[in-house]
Amino acid sequence: MIAEEALVKELKQKDSQAKAFEVLVNTYKERLYWHIRRIVLNHDDADDVLQNTFIKVYKNIEGFKGDSKLYSWMYRIATNEALTFLKQKSKKTEISDQELKTAMVENLQSDVYFEGDEIQMKLQQALAILPEKQKLVFNMKYFQEMKYDEISEVLETSVGGLKASYHLAVKKIEAYLKSD
Amino acid sequence: MKKNHKNKFKTPEGYFDSFNERLMEKIAKEESIIPKADGFGVPDDYFKNLNDNIISKLDEKEPKVIPLKSYKKFYYIAASIAAIAILTLAINWNDQPQLGFEDLASAEIDAYFDTTDMKLSSYEIAEVVSIDELELNDVLENSLEDEHILEYLDENINDIEELDLENEYYE
C-alpha cells in the first residue's frame, strides 16, 4: 500500500515524525484497542498495553523493514504486549495462567466498562478456556472481522490452519453456550 | 449475453471470488447462538484523549533504575582498581631504571648540603679540597677587590708606619 509506505517513510524522518505518528495513532488506535481489550478484558489494562504498544512502535520504527505490512507488524506488537502483560500478572499474583483468566472473567461482573448480559458473560467464560491461538483467531475473525490473509500475517500461521482453529473455536463456544 | 458497456462502476479486486465464502460466514453468524457483540465499553472521550496521553508518555524520561544492592557495584570497582594496581606494579617492578648521581639536579644537591650537617672538620675538608687550587674568593661570600682592601686600610690604619713594611717577607 503506497499510503502506508509513505507513512513509514515520514515516521523515520525527524522533521515529519511527530505528525506522522499522530496519523498512525488516529488510524489504528481503535482497532488495536479492541484487539488488546479482548485479550486483557479490563479497560485500564487495555489502555496501558495500548499505550505501550504505540510507544514501542514509535521507538522501533527504524527497525521496521517493510517485510510485512505496517498494521500487521503493529498487531503483532500489540498481541505480544498483551500476552506478556498477562504472563507478568499471573507471575505477580502467583497463580496459573488459567486461574488468572478465570479470575479476569469473574472480575467483569463488577467492571463498570462491561455491559454484557448473561449470554455475553457466558461467552467470556467460554473464551477463557479456549487455547490461546483459537481465542485470538476467534476474536480477530468474529468480532474484528479481519480476513484470514490479514490474520495469517499477524499470527504467522497458514490460512488453512487459521480456518481450522476458527472452526474449532466456534464449535467449542457454541457447545459451551448451549450447556447449562 | 449482451455486455454492459455503459457500466462505469468497479468492484474491489477479487470481490466476486470471495463472495460465497463471506456470504456463508454471514449466514453462519446469523444462525449462531454466539452473541454479535461482546458487551465491552470504554469511558467517554477515551479515544479522543488517547493521543495526548501517548504523547505525554513518550516525552517522559525513562526512570533511572537504582539497584537495591548498589554497594556491590563499589566492591567490584574497588577490587578491579586494586587488581589493576597490583598488576601494574608487578609488571613495572623489574623495569625500574637504576638512578645515578647524574640524575640528581644540582639544585637538589645544593639543598642537601644547605640543610644537612656534614660534621666534617676543617682537616677533613682540607683533605678533599686541594689548597693549591683554592683562592681567597672561594671562601668569601663577596669577592674581595683591591679597592675594598684599600678602603679598609684607609679607615682603620692611622699611621702608615704601623704597617711593618720593613718585613722582609713582603719585600
Image (spheres, rainbow, N blue to C red):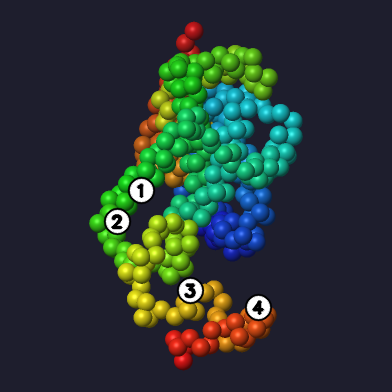
Q: For mark 3, what is the residue?
A: B139
Q: For mark 4, what is the residue?
A: B156
Question: How far separated are the C-alphas under marks 3 and 4?
Answer: 23 Å
Question: How far separated are the C-alphas under marks 2 and 3?
Answer: 46 Å
The percent coordinates of residue B19 (x first, y second) are 50, 44
Task: Say which chain tag 1 marks.
Answer: B
Q: Are marks 2 and 3 on the same chain?
A: yes
Say which of marks 2 and 3 sits in front: 3
Q: Is residue A43 above or below residue B104?
A: above
Residue at left 68%, top 42%?
B56
Looking at the rendered structure, the secondary structure element under dot 2 is helix
Q: What's under tag 1, amino acid-wise?
A: Ala
Question: How far separated are the C-alphas under marks 4 and 1?
Answer: 72 Å
Residue A83, visible in the rendered structure:
no
Say which of marks 2 and 4 sits in front: 4
The percent coordinates of residue A169 (x first, y second) are 43, 26
Check whether the beta carbons of the residues at disc 4 and disc 1 lie within 8 A of each other: no
The foreground one among A107 and A146 is A107
Residue at left 71%, top 34%?
B46
Q: Are marks 2 and 1 on the same chain?
A: yes
Residue A51, visible in the rendered structure:
yes
Question: How far separated are the C-alphas under marks 2 and 1?
Answer: 11 Å
Looking at the rendered structure, the secondary structure element under dot 4 is helix
Question: How far separated are the C-alphas under marks 2 and 4?
Answer: 68 Å
Q: For mark 1, what is the residue?
A: B85
Q: Are marks 3 and 4 on the same chain?
A: yes
Looking at the rendered structure, the secondary structure element under dot 3 is helix
Q: For mark 2, what is the residue?
A: B92
